[in-house]
Image (tube, helix red, strand yellow):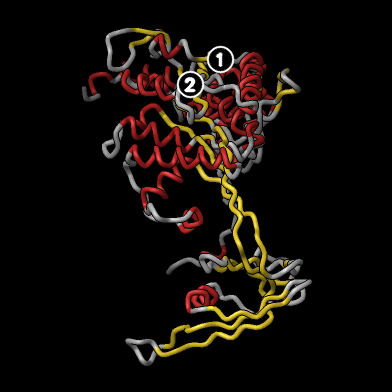
Amino acid sequence: MLEDITQYPRERFLRVGAHSHVKGLGLEGLKAKPVGDGLVGQIEAREAAGIVVKMIKEGKMAGRAVLFAGPPGTGKTAIACAIARELGSDVPFVTLSGSEIYSSELKKTEVLTQAMRKAIGVRLRERRRVYEGEITQLDIKTRKHPYNPYQEIPDHVVIELATKNDRRVFRAGATIAAHILQQGITLGDIVTIDAETGRVTKIGKSDEAAEKYDIATSDEKPVPRPSGPVEKEKEFIYVLTLHDLDQLSAHSRSGGLISILFGGSQTREIDNEIRREVDEMVKKRVEEGTGEIIPGVLFIDEVHLLDVEAYSFLNAAMESELAPIMMFASNRGITKVRGTDLSSPHGIPLDMLDRMLIISTRPYTRDEIRRILEIRSKEERVKISEEALEKLTTIGEQTTLRYAVQLLTPSYIIAKESGRTEITVGDVELAVELFADVKRSVEELEKWREKYLY
């Protein structure tokens, strides 16, 4: 017999990421607070990142790159995420792992090119003639389908639009009638009709016609009736990326800018000629004052996994007029540059390193580890006793901060199974027994060496 699943409690889905607690760099001016916006310590690195943010906002980072260099678990990716938060939602921030360029479907240079162009935003302004108002009369006429006499299809529509100052009646064709039927538009809806394309956009229900709900979705909330004439010119602003424009141009050379909103299949490899045409179009729009370039950030983690060919490509790409700000992270010391027999700091060629502002991160102190564990326990909604927090802090000192953070939730589950809502030292010790750190895992490998396959 199946159980009634409705008896189980419904809980809100909560996705806690490794850096979901990071809200910004935690700066006052250019001075870093000891603890701020989810970041702890790394004072010099955060202050350097603050200067980078100002350089990006002032458009003075062109042709440069930033490298976050430090041991594993010292906050390199966290600071990069904090930079993204500081830049705001309008600035594109694209993340890529060094291993992602080795794809069987795309060339390495194509993967990098697409990532760079996704990191360049373009704000386009278009003035379009539209009809806008509340529908006060709607009469859709139908006719028999030419191939199926039992089916009715829209033939034309008579529609009256009203604003606070104007009122007009229109007769429109089958395309606009079909758009109205597809969106379920009725009397009292406020709509915008593009005069050139005939595209109908439903804005909402008017104040007078809308039913008043105590709880309403965005579609159900009343919208005030527009003022001014029914026929007017409106400015539309689209924020796209260069990659979006590449895809649009590759998909349909004759398509207008507004067709990007309808989506479409994506082209995997894009011809360089198409990209040149897009670049020329963007430059022309910028010169005309109807476009604006928003330089974004391309962050490549584990950059030492790139090979010498990829470095050579990035080196040249940094000098391009339409290049994003590039940020890299590496936890390697002196190691071989992939694809060569040469050793270099962080596995990066020296000519590439010369172009980088290097921000170093260092291991955390005991107090900083404790504070990070406190922040993560709140983020993961875990209650922990002072003694258990001290125990985890010691574990973080002796092993790694990441290992200590990863033990929080297993310890809390152990506590809940024992009927407690707070983690104790015993819960942490049991979690340590069940989940090995890297050092203990290596010891197990040595102990059972003969049993493993080689």
Q: Crowding at label 1, few (<14), some or many (≥20) Cα neighbours within 10 Å?
A: some
Evaluate if marks 1 and 2 touch, with contact meaning CB atoms under 8 Å apart. Answer: no
Image location (x, y in percent) of residue 374: 66, 28
Q: Crowding at label 2, few (<14), some or many (≥20) Cα neighbours within 10 Å?
A: many
Amino acid beneath label 2: Ala
Residue drawn at x 29%, y 33% is: 107
Residue drawn at x 45%, y 23% is: 318
Which residue bears the numbered disc 2?
329
Q: Is residue 20 visible?
A: yes
Query: Who is closer to the viewer here, 155 or 297?
Result: 155
Residue drawn at x 69%, y 80% is: 136
Quarter of the picture containing the N terminus is bottom left
- Left/right of residue 112 with respect to residue 400 in the rendered view: left
- Left/right of residue 350 with respect to residue 385 in the rendered view: left
Q: Farthest left residue?
A: 454
Which residue bears the numbered disc 1?
359
Q: Is residue 441 above or below residue 144?
A: above
Amino acid beneath label 1: Ile
Helix, strand or loop at mark 2: strand
Residue drawn at x 55%, y 75% is: 180
Query: Who is closer to the viewer here, 439 or 353?
Result: 353
